[in-house]
Image: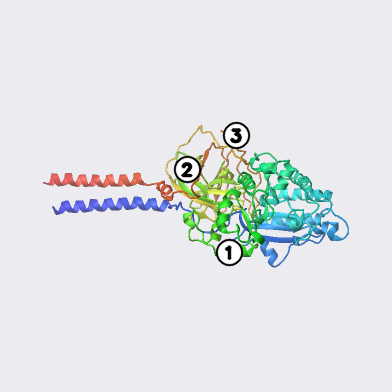
Amino acid sequence: MKKTLKFIFIAFLLIILLSTVVFSDNDSNTKEIDYTESLETFDNPERGFYYPFYYNFKVSGNELPSGHDIYKLKILEDENLVHLRLGIGEFSGKVNGDKDLEFSEDMLNMLDTILTTIKNNGGTAIIRFAYDNFEGDEDLEPSLDMILKHIEQICPILSKNESVLAYVELGFFGPWGEMHTSKISTPENVAKALDVMLDNTPEELKIGVRQPKYYVGWLGLDRDKLNENITVKGTREYRVGLFNDGYLGSHSDLGTFQNREIEVQWLENQALHTLYGGEVVETRGSEENDKINTSSYMAEEAFRTHTTYLNSDYDEDVIDSWKNEIYNGSDELYKGQTGYLYIVNHLGYRFVLRDSDVSGKNDILNINLKIENVGFANLVNNKKVTIVLKSGEKIYELPVKIDPTTWNSNEIVDLSAILNLPKDIAEGNWDTYLRISEYGNLETDNNYQAIRLANNNIWDETLGANYIGSFEYTEKIDNTTNTNNTTTKPSNNTVKNEAAKPSNNTIKNETAEPSNNTVKNETNKNNVTNKINNNNTNKTNNTSKNNTITESSVKNENSNKIDNSVANSNLPKAGYSKSIISILLGLSILYMVHCYNKYEK
C-alpha cells in the first residue's frame, strides 16, 4: 500500500511539473494584450494641439533664430505639430515702402531650411504665409499678379518637403493670412491663387481656405446646397478643406459659416480626407450667454467636423475652462475626467487595438486584427504599414498593402493578412508588431512619423511599432510554388513613393513597393522583406511574395467604444495542446500505477 501511495504521489508531482513547464513556456513567449483604450495622452504625427512658430523673411541675410524660438523648431516633448506663421511683408511694396518684389533665393533657401529642420527633429508642420507679418494690419498685400508669382515660387519647396507638411493653409490674403478684411481677398482672386497652388504641388498635399464661401466661389456651387457636394479622390476639389480661426467663437464661428448645419454636413465628408482645425475663440457679445465653445459641445460636434488640430496658445481662457469642466458624455471611459483630457486625446485620429490573432506555420504568417478609430478624425496623409518580426537580436520588416487613411473615425476595421514568412526565418518564438510610418523602412527612416496605438504596454519606441502578438515557429516547409492572390480593399489614397530619410549608417535603403490601391483584387508581385541584424552586419532580403490583405469596417453607432468583454474573449489561446498532452501523460502514469498495484496484489 505504501508503494502504491508513493507511485501515486510521484505521478501527481509529474503532472504538476509538466503542466507548470508548459504554462511557463507559454507565458514567456506570449505577452498578454490589454484591448481597452488607455487614458494616456501621447504624441502622434499630424494631429493634436500645435504651437505657433513665427518667422519674418528678409530679402537677404535670413538666419535660423536662436534661443527660445529655435527651441520650438526642435519639437517640444509633448507636441510634434508646428504651425509655421511666415511673414513675407518685405516683398510687398505696401510694407517695404518701395515696390513689390519676387521672393529672393535667400528667402526660398531659408524656407527649405526651416522645413528640413522640423523634419530632422521628428516634427510635422502646418504652414501659412501673411504679408502683414502676423501683426493684424489690413490691405498690405502686393498686386494679385505678384501674389500668384509668390505662390508659384514656393511650390517647389513645398513639394520637396511634402512629407513634413501636414497641411497648407492658403493664407496670403488679409491680416494674419486669415483671408478676410482685405479689399483684394475676393472669391475670384482666391480662386486664382488656389488654382496656382493646386497646379504646382503634389496631389497628396491638402490645402485649406478660410471659409466655405471661397470653396463654393471657386467651384461655382450654390452655398445653400453645399452639403450635397461629395468629392471623389483624384479630383482637385478632393484636396481642398477649411481652416477655422474663429472656432466655436459664436454660432457662426465668427462669420466662418453661413448655415452651420449645412456646412457641417459638408465637413462630415470633406474633412475625412482634409485636415480641419484652427483656433478656439472666446465668445463675446450677444451670444455670451449661449456659448458653444465648451468641451461638452465640442466633444459631440467634433466627430462631425473631424477636428484634427488646435492652437495650444489661443484662447487660453477657453482652454483653461475645459480643464475645469468635467466630461459627462457617452464615453464611459472618460466620465469623471476633464473635458480637456477628452479633447486632447481625441483630436485627429486615435487608433485602439481591439483584438488580435497572430499565428505562423508552414512559412505562412496569419494576422487578424480589429482596430477602432476613436478619434474625431481620420489619418489624412498616406502612411506605409509594415509587420515587424523580432526574436532576440533578429528583426524582419514585411511590407503590407494596408491603407490606414481608410480607418474612419468612430468605426472598427477588421484586418486580415496572410503573409509569406522570410525564407531564412529561424525556429523559435517571434514577437509581432504593427508599424505605421511615413517611409516603412525600419533600417533608415528613424521612426519618422511612426504612429502609436492607444493601448497600454504595446508600444515599442525603439521599433516605432505596436505589439500585436507572438507565434512559435516550429515547422518550415520549402514551398516551391505559391498560389496566393493579393486582394486589397479599394483605397481612397495612393501611398507616396518617397525614399526614406537618409541615416548616418551605410545600410542600403530598400522600401516597399508603392501601393496604388484603386483596383479590387490587385496582385502585389514584388513585396520587399527587410531583414535587420543588430550586430552591425545589417542585410536586406528582397523576396518576391504574394500576400493577401482584406479590410472591412463597421460603423460604431452607439458610442465610440466597443464592449471590451467581447474583445478580450477573443484573445489568442496558445499552448493548450501542450497542456492537454501533459495531462494525458500524467493520466497514463496513473494508469500504469493502477496496473502495477493490481499486479502486485
Which disc number belongs to residue 368?
Answer: 2
Which disc number belongs to residue 519?
Answer: 3
Amino acid at circle 3 = Val
Q: Nearer the viewer, residue 208 or 575?
A: 208
Q: Which residue is depicted at the point 66% across and 45% down?
A: 498
Cα separation, mark 2 vs mark 3, equals 22 Å
Looking at the image, residue 91 sits to the left or right of residue 211; the answer is: right
Which disc number belongs to residue 195?
Answer: none
Amino acid at circle 2 = Asn
Q: Nearer the viewer, residue 358 or 299?
A: 299
Mark 1: few/some/many CA within 10 Å (<14, 14-19, 20+): some
As drawn, which residue projects farthest toward the front?
Answer: 286
Q: Which residue is mark 1?
A: 321
Mark 3: few/some/many CA within 10 Å (<14, 14-19, 20+): few
As drawn, which residue projects farthest toward the left?
Answer: 601
Find residue 153 and report its horizontal and vertical position in percent: 79, 49
Find residue 520 and report its horizontal and vertical position in percent: 57, 34
**On screen, residue 284 above or below 494:** below
**On screen, residue 317 above or below 107:** below
Foreground mark, 2 or 1, reads 1
Looking at the image, residue 485 sits to the left or right of residue 74; the answer is: left
**Mark 1 or mark 2, which is nearer the start of the sequence?**
1
Quadrant of res 228: top right
Looking at the image, residue 158 sits to the left or right of residue 381; the answer is: right
Find residue 573 and report its horizontal and vertical position in percent: 39, 46
Cα separation, mark 1 vs mark 3, equals 48 Å
Cα separation, mark 2 vs mark 1, equals 42 Å
Is residue 557 visible in the rendered structure shown here? Answer: yes
**Mark 3 or mark 2, which is nearer the start of the sequence?**
2
Q: Secondary structure at mark 1?
A: helix
